[in-house]
Image (spheres, rainbow, N blue to C red):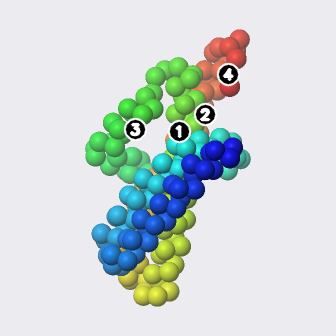
Amino acid sequence: MFLKWVKLVPIVSRGAISTSFMFRYLEVTSAAFSVALNFFLMFWVTLFESQWKPGLQSAYFNPYPFEKQGKVYRWLGVEGYQAILTKSGWEKLRQQQTPIKKDLQAFLAYEQASRVAEAGHVVMAGIILLITGYVVAVYSIRDALWLIVFNLFFNIYPILLQRYTRPRLQRMIRKFKVAEPDRIYS
């Protein structure tokens, strides 16, 4: 456990230092700052998660009753966002990391990957929300517009997409477990 923290402290420190350089050299109200901040945070959060390897068994990740059919998420345009990811090639990259095969282990791995992705986006959205609050307080809501727009696109919609997908993944996992009751699953 101690060794894990020894690895994590430099990652967090370097992430904070690189972000502070962005504050120094980029205008916080610019689109360039907003995009760069999102990608820097994605890099550092991914690196952090790869070292920490969180279990993510919190009840937060369980679907709420209103999420099971996905109507709210469809109304919010999550399927359109998913189409953008597919057309941009992002889904091909994701499928290389966690390919979907029609077996239980693949669905379990993908469901866990959805938790990790959601947790990372929640952390990034929170950090950007704090920075957005700072920009609103020091400048104006108009000056924070790029932060708000890119936080929605790079973090909020990915969170919604994970929440939309997870109930379907869990239904498939239950079907596999019913079809093969004598196997032991972790």
Identity, as a three-letter code, of the amino acid under mark 1: Ala
- The residue carrying mark 2 is 170
* Horizontal arrangement in the rendering, residue 104 relative to residue 132 (left or right): right
- The residue carrying mark 3 is 94
- The residue carrying mark 4 is 185
In the displayed structure, 52 sits above or below 14; it is above
Identity, as a three-letter code, of the amino acid under mark 2: Gln
Q: Are marks 4 and 1 in contact (CB under 8 Å)?
A: no
Binning the other alpha carbons within 10 Å of mark 1 as few (below 14), some (14 to 19) or many (20 upward) gives some
Distance between the alpha carbons at the discs numbered 1 and 3: 10 Å
- Which residue: 67% across, 50% down? 60
Point out the tag, 1 or 3, that comes first from the N-terminus: 3
Distance between the alpha carbons at the discs numbered 2 and 3: 19 Å
Mark 1 element type? helix
Q: Are marks 2 and 3 in contact (CB under 8 Å)?
A: no
Q: Nearer the viewer, mark 2 or mark 4?
A: 4
Point out the tag, 2 or 4, that comes first from the N-terminus: 2
Distance between the alpha carbons at the discs numbered 4 and 3: 24 Å
Image x and y of residue 59, in percent: 71, 47
Location of the C terminus by quadrant is top right
Residue 89: tell me if it is visible.
Answer: yes
- The residue carrying mark 1 is 113
Image x and y of residue 101, in percent: 46, 22
- Which residue: 34% across, 64% down? 35
Binning the other alpha carbons within 10 Å of mark 2 as few (below 14), some (14 to 19) or many (20 upward) gives some
Distance between the alpha carbons at the discs numbered 2 and 4: 14 Å
